[in-house]
Amino acid sequence: MQIFENLESNVRSYSRSFPAIFSLARGSILLTDDGRKIIDFLAGAGALNYGHNNHRIRAAIAEYLASDAIVHGLDMATPAKLEFMETFSSIILRQRDMQYRFQFTGPTGANAIEAALKLSRKITGRQNVISFTRGYHGMSLGAIAASGNRFYRTGSAVPLSGVSFMPYDGYLGPAIDTADYLRKVLFDESGGIDRPAAILVETVQGEGGINVARNEWLRSIESIAKNIGALFIVDDIQMGCGRTGEFFSFECAALSPDIVVLSKSISGYGLPLSMLLIKEGLDLWQPGEHGGTFRGNNLALVAATAAINAYWRCRTFSEGIQRMGDLTRRRLDAIASRYGNGFSVRGRGMALGFDCQKPELAEVTARKAFEKGLIVERCGAVAEVVKILPALTIDLEILNQGLEIFEEALTEAMKQT
Ligand SMILES: *Cc1c(COP(=O)(O)O)cnc(C)c1O
């Protein structure tokens, strides 16, 4: 690791939490160069919902590469893009009675967020955007302006403007419906909040601590957006693509966002791909107005098509995620109640958070887990929550082994902290 310390910028982060050289991976198991096998409960921060090197997806990529088909084509038309849009339309959208246009943005989630905000501001002629406490939307200036974390915001070193933060569901305790507050200030002629171009929300806050918004709250936010003439944007970058059990995280709330932002697991293989789904009638871009060299990378599109074909043609995969999520949840709930300490478990589907209350405890737990062969990351305002984010394709046996390690690590950490 010394050479990484000497050569790589101090900004590196995950390599500090997980000090090893990772050389091979398959499914939910990583292999280090010194021969350790490590269970992965981080899944590329949600970019590997189908596991590492998923062979059902890899076959399509390998065949595509071997055929001399277009890999990089800017945003030109290719059969790979056509096939993706047709597959996504018929298997994902049409089955859910949804109608959207596709915008392929630059490869990062942050770039797709920038595009969504830019389009909302252009359509409405307004500047302000409503976003929520503990929200996370990416690291570029527009996206970080809409993100709560002080450390990241400070890192920008320029004024971050154009966003008003409102309390997320549950932020002020269970007795207060924060949607009522949002409605009140927005419709108050002297409420001090400029009319928003958009309301940007995560249905479950990933980086913010696996905070789950209630369906009624989400529906209220959607209707407030509609009433005030703002676009309703769901950032489904981390919680989409099956993470919460259904393809989109907002299906259980029956929302109909004006813009849906997808990235992370949309390519299915960890290849960079980001996109917006834009409601018919809202696609008011001028040609080329949001550009990018790496829009809709064809290899990623081929992988995305293969992933949808492999997992989303019927309900089996989705039902499996929900079953596995319930099982994981019960196991974590049992751990939380066994050790007390104010622990709590939150989440939906296979996006789960174990709230340790204390950041040191979460930190030591994650460190000990890694020593014992499990990768888990932390999230929340002060990284006090251990995030359980396994691949959706994980074997039950490996899932249980990982949970076993988590419990051992937690108990040891409790003795030490
Ligand atoms: C990861 C993430 C982003 C940013 O995506 P990048 O590819 O890292 O730019 C935005 N929103 C949410 C909810 C995320 O989890």
Image (spheres, grey):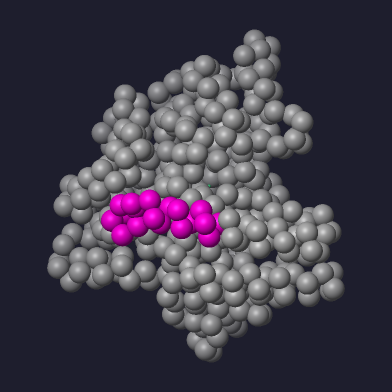
Q: Position of residue 123 (x, y in %)?
A: 40, 23
Query: Does 300 appear above or below 397?
Result: above
Please report the residue visible at 63 percent of the width from the left and 57 percent of the height from the top. Answer: 329
46 vs 283, nearest the viewer: 46
Quadrant where the N terminus sits is bottom right
Please report the residue visible at 66 percent of the width from the left and 73 percent of the height from the top. Answer: 404
Q: Position of residue 62 (x, y in %)?
A: 24, 70
Query: Does 349 appear above or below 8?
Result: above
Q: Position of residue 348 (x, y in %)?
A: 57, 49
The quadrant where residue 385 appears? bottom right
The segment highlighted magenta reads: 308-325
Residue 327 appears in the rendering: yes
Residue extending furthest toward the bottom: 34
Quadrant where the C terminus sits is bottom right
Q: Position of residue 336 (x, y in %)?
A: 75, 60
The rendered magenta stretch, by its main secondary structure, is classed as helix
Please report the residue visible at 48 percent of the width from the left and 56 percent of the height from the top. Answer: 321
299 vs 321, nearest the viewer: 321
Residue 377 within the magenta-colored segment of the rendering: no
Residue 316 within the magenta-colored segment of the rendering: yes
Residue 130 appears in the rendering: no
Image side of residue 2 versus residue 29, left or right: right
Image side of residue 44 versus residue 122, left or right: right
Please report the residue visible at 58 percent of the width from the left and 25 percent of the height from the top. Answer: 220
User: How many numbered markers are drawn?
Assistant: 0
